[in-house]
Structure formats: C-alpha cells, structure tokens
Amino acid sequence: MKISASVYSDKKRDLAATIADLADHKVDMLHVDCNDDLSVFEDIRQIREWTSIPIDLHIITTQPEKYFDLLRKHPVEYVTFQLEDLEKPLQLPADIPGKKGLAIITPTPINAFDDYASFDFILIMATIPGQSGGVFDALNFKKIRDFRKKYPQKRVHVDGGVNGEVSFILRNMGVYSSVSGSYLFNAPSIGHALMDLTKREVDSHFEVKDFMIPLEESPSIQLGDATFHTVLESIEEGKLGFTLIMDQKRLVGLVSNADVRKAILKFGPEVFNQQVEQFMNQQPVVLNETATVNGMLKLIRSFAFPISYLPVVNDAGEARGIITFVNLIKGEL
C-alpha cells in the first residue's frame, strides 16, 4: 500500500522543508488538500520544481469547473473531488490528465460512486474532512469491503485516522493508498512514522470482528448439505480457495483446495461417494472474534506452516466470519 503524505499537516516547517524531508524518505505520494482555494496551484507549481513525487490532489468545492484550466496547466497524477460539496453532477473534461477519483465521507453509501464508475478510484474519508488527527471510523472497513466487491477493478484510497494498526488492516484489505497527515508529522521523525505505517508489528485497538469478512459474505455450507460436489461448488463460488463446514451456527470443519486434491488422490473416482467427514479438516486453526491485530499475528507466527486464511469464531465455537491474507500474500500490489 502506498503512503500519501498530507503536506499541509506539517505545522512546524515551511512547505519547501516539508517536501525536502518527504523526498529524502521516498514517500510514495504527496497529498495536497484544496479547500476551494485556487492559490493551492501555486504550491503545486513549486512542488513540481522541488520533486517528481506524484501529487495526490483533493479538491473540495461547489464549483469544480473553475479548476479545470488550472488542472490542464498544472497536471497532477491523481485528482479527487469531494462528492458532498458538489451542487450538481460533476462532468470532468476528457483532456484533464491524471487518474480521477471521487471522495465520499463515512455516512455516504458506496453506491454514490455508480454515477462516476468511469473514474479510477474512490477516496473514503474515514474521519471528518479537514479534521487533523481524527480517529478512524470502523464503519469504513465494511465500506471498503463492499466497494471492492462491487468494483473489483477500481482502486480504494483512504484518508483519515490512519495509524500503524489501521495501516496494517488496510493493507490486508487491499487498499491502494492511505493518506497520512498528523500521524506522519507528529512522530519523532517522518522515518519513524513511515516505519510504523509499513511494519507488521502494530499496537492493537481494533478487534478482528471490526474488519473481518462476516459470515454472510463467507463461503460456507451446512454439514447436512455437504457432498464432494456441493463442497466444490461452494469453493468455486466463494473464490477464496476454501469453504467452511457448518452445523447450524457451529463451525465443524473446513475444506480447502488442498483438501480436495488430497481426497482425489486418496479415493480416486470414489471420492464423490465419500462423506464430507472423510476429507474435511475437522480441526482448522481458528481465531476468536475478540482477538486484536497483535493477537492474530501472534497466532499466525505460532505455526510452522503458512496460513493464508483464518475462520473467525466466538466463545461458543460459532462461526462469525473469516480473515484472509491474500492481499499481503500478493505483495500488497
């Protein structure tokens, strides 16, 4: 996941010193907030003289058309308009360069993006826009998941409340870029903050249930309905490489692609006649829904074999959802 540094969040230094420090630390992008202020483009002109780091521009205005010529004269790599401030539907001219994004606040549903589906990404404001040092609203974990499900080819950017723990969760959810402001500049140094935002050891405040894929969105099948064929169908439909085996609410096992291969090798053509108990993993590694991020990492590290997904259960052993690590395994591309 790329880190986009919010350049105006540095209240201690002038812009030139801030940009020089960010360039020295090879930050991925420079986030420039434009709260209906045309003079921001003079800063963009100067930034272009100081560095080639991509600029990530977020414009909040009721009149986007007054920025079109400036965007042509001072092109940026990413330009985002805040939906809630628009007085009418946004029509961006085709000759404006850069990737286009739509920013929405937490209460706005992700289907607001439907009218802008030609855009390249969505920017989810996880705190109040313009509020420095705000706390990430956990409701946005579901919004990210819903958006990625509806628009799998579109990128997700997040702004607001991103600390080391939230950064880890967002990376695991496949978020492309997160904006960091006060967290980045209030640390002992930018280097310290960037290490916190990209390391795998994090302080924990959220619980797994805050960001897991809930059971209703997870591949699962009831034990009474489970045959080799129906299990294969559930794995295929779930597109995650496994399915949970349930007895009502209770998790009784898991069947993965690896379990399917082993069953075929063991039983041959007779595999379709086998009871699911003959080939499912009846003791999968599970994670309690109240576990913290550090608790999750500690569990994973306690096993010698790699873990790419974890069923999530409550204290009664009832399935609550799943955690997958596919985005981390892909190298967070």
Image: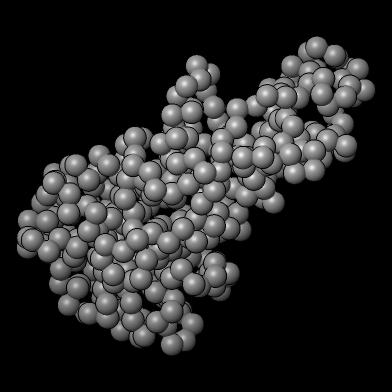
Task: Report the residue at 79% width, 33% height from top.
Answer: 232
Residue farthest top in this picture: 266
Task: Report the residue at 45% width, 35% height from top.
Answer: 295
Render colour scheme:
one colour
Location of residue 247 by image quarter: top right
Residue farthest front in this picture: 316
Q: Eyeballing the image, is 143 above or below 235?
A: below
Q: Eyeballing the image, is 121 above or below 173?
A: below
Task: Report the residue at 62% width, 42% height from top.
Answer: 314
In which quadrant of the rendered image does the C terminus lie? top left
Q: Position of residue 290 (x, y in %)?
A: 52, 44
In which quadrant of the rendered image does the N terminus lie? top left
Q: Position of residue 329 (x, y in %)?
A: 48, 32
Residue 144 seen in the figure? no
Q: Position of residue 83 (x, y in %)?
A: 44, 76
Q: Position of residue 252 (x, y in %)?
A: 74, 32
- Left/right placement of residue 21 relative to residue 264 reads left
Q: Which one is nearer the viewer's eye here, 258 or 283?
A: 283
Residue 63 seen in the figure? yes
Q: Which one is nearer the viewer's eye here, 331 or 312?
A: 312
Q: Eyeballing the image, is 142 above or below 320?
A: below
Q: Which one is nearer the viewer's eye here, 89 or 319?
A: 319
Q: Which one is nearer the viewer's eye here, 270 or 127?
A: 127
Location of residue 245 by image quarter: top right
Task: Report the residue at 38% width, 73% height from top.
Answer: 81
